[in-house]
Image: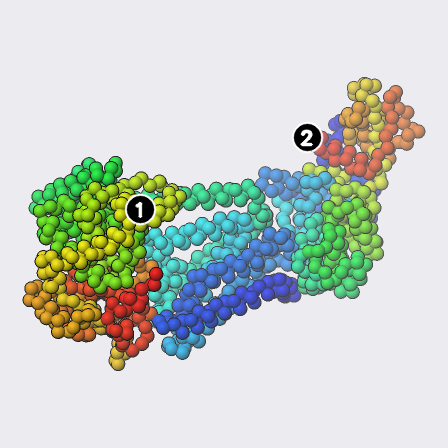
Amino acid sequence: MQDDDDMTTTANAGAWAAGADSAGGRAGRVIEMDGVRKAFGALQVLDGLGLSVERGEVFGFLGRNGAGKSTAIRLLMGITRADAGKVLVFGESIAGDVVAVRRRIGYVAQEQNLYPWMTPRTLARFVRGFYPRWDEARWARLTDDFGLPPKRRVGTFSGGMKAKLALSLALATRPDLLILDEPTAGMDPVARREFVDLVREHTMREGATTFFSTHLVDEIEAVADRIGIVEGGRTVYEGQLRPLRESMARFSVALEDDVPGSLPGDFAQRRLRVLEDRPRVGRRVVTLQFSGAAPPAIETPLEAGWRRESMTLEDVFIAMVARRRDALG
Amino acid sequence: MRAVASLIGKDVREHGLTALVLAAATVIVVLVALGQNRAAAFSMSPFEVVRFALLTYVPLVSLIVGNRLVVREYLAGTRLFVEALPVGGTWPLVLKYLLGAGYLTVLVAVLVLLAARAAGLADDATPAYVLSLGGKALVVALLYWSVVFCFSLCGHLRVILYLATIGLVLFVAWWPGIDQTRFSPFALLDAQLFVFERDLLPWRDILGTLALAAAFTIAGFALSRVGEGSVAERLAKPMTRRDHAALGVLLVGGAIVASVLVDRRERESIAFTSEATLRSSVPPVSVFHVDGSYRASAERRLARTVESIAELQAVLGVTSVPVVRLSLAPELEPHDVQYSTLDDVLVRANWLAHDDFDDAVLDAVVLHGVLGSLSGERAMFEPYHWVLDGLSRWWAERSHEGARDAHEAELLARAIFTLARAEGSDDLIDDWQLLADRFAYPSAEAIAWSAMRYLEIERGEETVLTLARAFFGEALGGNSLDALRDRRRPTRMRFAEATGTAWDTFVADWRDWLAERAADPAVRALLDGTPPLTGTLAAGFDDAGVHRLVGGYRPVAGINGRAAAEALSRAVADSPALRCVMKHDVLGPFDNEFDVDQGRDPRTRDVADCGLGDAIHDVGSRYAPGLRVYVGFDLENGTFHQPLRLGAVRLDLEDAALAPVSARGDIDDAAAASATPR
């Protein structure tokens, strides 16, 4: 297991980044974070976070609750400052002209703290004063598309409507970067799906760089070109989703048939790392990650009692996060 | 600039209506106050309205503005929305500060200008004066806003901070040991200087207040930046049940601590530490005699006091009595006895100059203090008060067997003389305060004593003592319920239970007995030697524009001028030192019991040879219209030991020409007119 630790540390530098960053050089990077640390008192929220987002891509920022996603976004917005490390947005340090940077960012927060007494119309009147590139026609089209009543008070809107309103506001500013900080939190599945579809539709149409933070893996699957997984304030994976998914394979054996320390077959020796090895519902479950695609079933003769399990994207995410948690623990 | 305009526009849209309503309410309140002031007979400076508003209305408005501009933004979390907009970190808060300050500035400026306009009709409101006053008002308003701004950023802690601030302000304003007129911002709002100082700007106080405002402002902004705003954000979250409970405990605890501390302060006793002090431990009496040459008199005084109190204690069956401290005060007139009661009884008197009657007066004062303290001051309750006064004197006289007859004659004559002119305010239970106010304490005491004396003669000494036990001897619980229960028992019923006589029967019989005693030779002689006069009073501006109080004397109703003149001549012949004294002083709004004799301040006494006429006393330029004054007329150094009050009146001075204070011109008429009908 020596290799596991090595890979954990290099993940922050983007060393294990399957299919990543050939698309753009440094000049094409909209977001670049490197070795970012941030603590609130004794609580170390970010502990050397590193990631980069290329121009025009939709970047899924995955992590459990409390993993440090919102803090990373607050750093990108210049709301808080990093204790250490590099935070570049549009190639500029966020500590410089924060107002100029924010004018190019459309931001949808996790909680829509919109003025409840305002209507979408008055809200737009308020917000457009801050954005020189405000596009009134686009705003009108978006609110129309989203079915937002322009004269109804925001306080009477449902959570989904508020999120759509916030997205409309963000897109109407013609942003170079759209940051979505868990915008679907608290929404029901239908509203969530609808919202994600809207994001996908508009990002595809406008070609804006999108930084989509969430802890819901299926949301990311639908829209993201690349993903970054953060756990314990560090990036544990950055790259495309498909290679990550294909690099993993899960096996299980009934506990009564299990020989402690055994592996599902000889092929397992070629693994990059063991992501997960734990008992679950009467079976020992082992998740392996390979440096390339996991060998197909036909090439992986299993030892007696072992069987290959299917893996959802959520399983992939949990396995990645679990490994990091085990490493920390 | 567009971002700033957006932020301002948002706040104007959000709070504009409230701001307008508040401004309109302010203007209405001020206009009403100014209108009432102008219409009132005794108007004050319109700028007093500004000061009043600064002390009451403006802090309230500041609180509302702060709550809407700052607290709501944090509480609703909308600050987080603004925080992510492309605008500098502190700009939204700076704009809110400026908006609030600007709004209050406009409000105060309108207030001052309205007052200036009203003042301009009658007062010399020069631009420099108005500017100076407006400047001071704005500085005070800025302080209010800075405090509110700072506290608004403290989230739910602001409630505690406001309460603590109010407590601190009240403490500074009312604590006797602190002269708040010496430091800002209290000095800036000084009752006299704020309005009436026309020439000098109190720069020190202005700068002090501004510094305080700056400190609160800086503290507010600093707080908004601590932890990148996370502290203010955390504090902004609504209070939990636990927070509410903690706040409740804190408030109750604070109230208890405060009450204990205040109580302790009140209970701080005055100790005679001088070696020139004689002491008795049971009952606890100490006598300070200045120096050794007065030691013998102090020993006599101590023995007399100890004996009197010890016997009273035994008769009433009370286990402990308050500490009595007597201090010799050779500078006082023989009949002047000064006393105060906290838990202890402190009495100052010049017993070196006393005769037997004066000694009895002093004994009665000491007993009055002891009984009042024993009753937990409930004896001061008006329906009980006559019992306290009467019993004190009765007990003192009871110990003066030798001189009792002479004392009795004087007391009876005083009681008869006073009751004859006290019609309408002579009910012992319901009118005691009024009676004492009109005719002074010695006369009220004589009346109460006569009632006790009659009770003793008719029902025996034991009945008087039973009455005393009923009012002062019964242990009273220390809580409010016991006090309420005590007061729910009607005094008439309590009297009837103690004496076996119905109150109305007793009063009728007692008054008949008094009337009969008027024929006693000794009493008659005293009454004949007392001129049947009453006071006259006129007040107002004379032709020269000077405000004057003009007093005089005329016969009481039913006595013709000639008879009165003869009686006056007789009185002067019998007592060449007889003087007529008009006593006067300003009444505070809550002055209930008022002793114009206190301190014998020559500025409040106009002494004249007695005579008939309406212009014996003339006090010019001492009082102004709008003030409330007490004016009483006394005969001093006559046949009575203590001054004999002919009558008195409480008067609101009007802005009018010099004229009699009542239709008839005399004070009995004025007092009757001003008495509250029952």
Q: Is residue A118 left or right of residue B211?
A: right
Cα separation between marks 1 and 2: 83 Å
Q: Identify the chain of the residue marked 2, using the numbered disc in the image.
A: A
Look at the picture and state if A268 lies above or below A15: above
Residue situated in front as seen by the camera: B371 or B174: B371
- Tell me the kind of residue under disc 2: Gly
Which percent across, then down, holds residue A319? 78, 33
Residue situated in front as seen by the camera: B606 or B110: B606
Q: Is residue B557 left or right of residue A108?
A: left
Within the image, what quadrant is residue A227 found in? Answer: top right
Which percent across, then down, holds residue B417? 18, 61
Which percent across, then down, holds residue A82? 63, 46
Q: Identify the chain of the residue marked 1, using the numbered disc in the image.
A: B
Q: Which residue is drawn at the image coordinates 67% and 49% (left, top)? A: A74
Q: Which residue is drawn at the image coordinates 25% and 73% (left, top)? A: B665
Colour convention of the picture: rainbow
Label 1 sits on a secondary structure element that is: helix
- Tell me the kind of residue under disc 1: Arg
Within the image, what quadrant is residue A1 found in? Answer: top right
* Front tag of 1 and 2: 1
Q: Is residue B216 visible?
A: yes
Q: Residue furthest bottom?
A: B543
Q: Which mark is residue A329?
A: 2
Please give the residue where the numbered disc 1 appears in the rendered image: B494
Look at the picture and state if B202 lies above or below B492: below
Q: Is residue B461 left or right of residue A31?
A: left
Q: Which residue is drawn at the image coordinates 44% and 42% (left, top)? A: B253
